[in-house]
Image: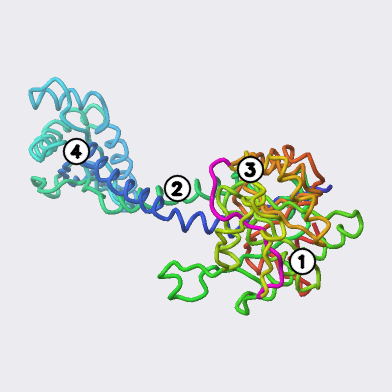
Amino acid sequence: MSNESRNQNILREISFFSIMRDVLTRLYLILLAAAIGYMGAQIAVEQFYVPEYTSSVTLVISAKDSSNTAYANLARNQQIAEVFIEVIGSEMLADKITEELGVTKMPGRISATRLENTNLLRIDAVARTPERAFRLIHAVIATHGEVSDYVFSNAVVDVMNDPKMPTSPSNPKSLVQTQQIASISCAAGMLTLLVVLSIMRDTVKSPLGLNSHVDAKIISTICYERKYRTLKSWFKRRKVPILITNPMISRAYVEETQKLYMQIEHISREKGYKVFMITSTCENEGKSTIAANLAIAGANAGKNILLLDGDFRNPSIYKILEIERNDKNGIEKCLSRISPLENCVEYQKRLGIWTLLPERSHRNSAELVSTRRMKEIVSECRSNHDIILVDTPPSSVLTDAEVMSAFCDCVLLVVRHDFAYVCDINDTIDRLNNCAMLGCVLNNYRQFESIYERSPYGGYAEDRKG
C-alpha cells in the first residue's frame, strides 16, 4: 500500500463528528482552562511585577573647534557622540557615580542612545523608585565630564533639558494583554488535548476502522436515529422506540435494517442456521432495538419469526415493542415446567411476530440460562419457527451470552459507533466461540455527509471503497 493510500485510510478512520462531539460535550473544560489561564496570569503578574522608573536627560555633543564645514562638523560630532555612548556604559563612570552617591553598588542602570542623524544624546537612568532614578541621572550629569575628558579633551557637552522626577512606572503592568494571551493559550491547549484524546481513543469510529481492528467482518452499518422526535419529547425526556414500523423513522434506517435481515435469511438458507444470537460488548449499544427490528423485518418478509428475550437481568424487549409485560406465562413458567412452551410463546398481532419474554427481572440470570431446560426450549422452538432471534445481555456485564451461545447457531455482534474499546470487542469475539460469528453491525453511526458522501443505494460510498 502506498503512503498516500495509507494516509487516506488513516484520515478515513478519524471521526470528525466524534471529535466535534467530544469538544462540545467537554466545552466546560476549555472554559475552565481559559479561566485558570486568566487567573494564573493575574497572579503571576502581581507576584513577579517589579515597577521601574526612568528619568531622562538630553545632551548636545559637539567639538570645541568648528573650523570645518557644517557637514564635517556634524559628522565629527556624531562620531564623538558614538564614543560618548561607550563612556556612559563604562565601569569607570559607574565607579564615579557610586562615589558621587555614596553607595557601594549602582542603584539602577543607565543607557545612552543617539538620536538618528543628530549629535543629540539621550541618557536614561532606570531604578526601582522615582527618587533613585532622579538621583542617578543627576549623578551621571555631575560625573560624565571627568570620564569623557580621558577620551575626548576637545568635546563640549551641553544639557538641553533638566531631568524631572518620574511620576509613573516606565514599565506599566500589561495585565489585560497578558490575561488575554494566557487565557487563549490555555484554552487552545485544552482544545488540542481533547482532539488528541478523541483521535487516540481506541474505539470503532468508522466502518473501515471496524474492518481494520476488529477480529470479525462488518456486515452492516446502521445510521444514527433520533430517539427524541419532537422538542416536547426532548424536554420531557420521553424516548420514542426506534422501530421500522414507525412512519417517522428515516428511510435509510429502515433500508439498512431490511438489508441486514436479508443477510440473516440468506445465511439461514445457505447453512441451515435458525437460531441467531444478538449481543454486544457493553450496555446501551442498541442490540435489543436491532433484534426487535430484525424480527419485524422478517415478519414483513412473510417468515415465522420468534423473538426470545434472553436478558433475564434487564429484559427490555417488551418496552421496545410497547407491549404489556405478561406476569402469567413468561419464559420462567416454561423453565420451571409450570406451563408448556405453547402457552408461553405469544403472538403479537400488531407486529406479526412471536415473542418469548421474561415476566420480570432476575438476579440469578446465569442459573436460568444454563439449565438443561433452556436448551430444550430452544430446541423445541426450532421446529416451530423459521428464524429465532435471541437477545442476550452484554457479554462484558454477564456470562449469559457465553452460556447461550452454546444453544445458538450464529452470533451477530452489535458495535456502537465510538463506544466500546476495540480490545473489549475482540475479547467478546474470543469468548463467543461456541457458535459461528456472522459478523458485526456498526450501530448508531454518525458522520458528516460532506466528508463521507452517502451512497444512493444505502451506506457510505467512501467506506465501500475501503
- Tell me the CA gap for discs 3 and 2: 49 Å
Residue underneath mark 3: 368
Number of disc labels: 4
Q: Give x and y (percent) for residue 168.
A: 13, 48
Instruction: Count neighbours of disc 3 (C-alpha within 10 A) and say few if under 14, some if 14 to 19, many if 20 or more.
Output: some
The correct choice, above or below, for 100 with respect to 379 in the image is above
Look at the numbered discs 4 and 2 and tell me whether their residues touch, using CB distance below 8 Å.
no
Q: Distance between the residues labelled 3 and 1?
A: 45 Å
Determine the CA span between mark 4 and mark 1: 70 Å
Dot 4 or dot 1: first in sequence order is: 4
Q: Which of marks 3 and 2 is nearer the N terminus?
A: 2
Q: Earlier in the sequence, mark 3 or mark 4?
A: 4
Tell me the element at label 1: helix
Give the x, y percent position of residue 111: 25, 38
Q: Identify the amino acid type marked 4.
A: Val
Of the residues under marks 1 and 2, which one precedes in the sequence? 2
Three-letter residue code for mark 2: Met
Residue on which the image places disc 4 = 126
* Residue designated by label 2: 190
Real-space CA distance between mark 3 and mark 4, rounded to the nearest whole angstrom: 87 Å
Q: What element carries label 3?
A: helix
Mark 3 or mark 1: name the one nearer the start of the chain.
3
How crowded pointer 4 is (Cα within 10 Å; few <14, some 14-19, many 20+) is rated as many
User: Where is residue 114 shown, x and y percent of the image?
Assistant: 29, 46
**57 sits left or right of 263 in the view:** left
Q: Nearer the observer, disc 3 or disc 1?
A: 3
**Residue 204 visible in the current orientation:** no
Side of 460 where 135 appears, left or right: left
102 w.r.t. 130: above or below: above
Label 2: which secondary element: helix
Query: Which of the 4 quarters of the picture holds residue 433?
Result: top right
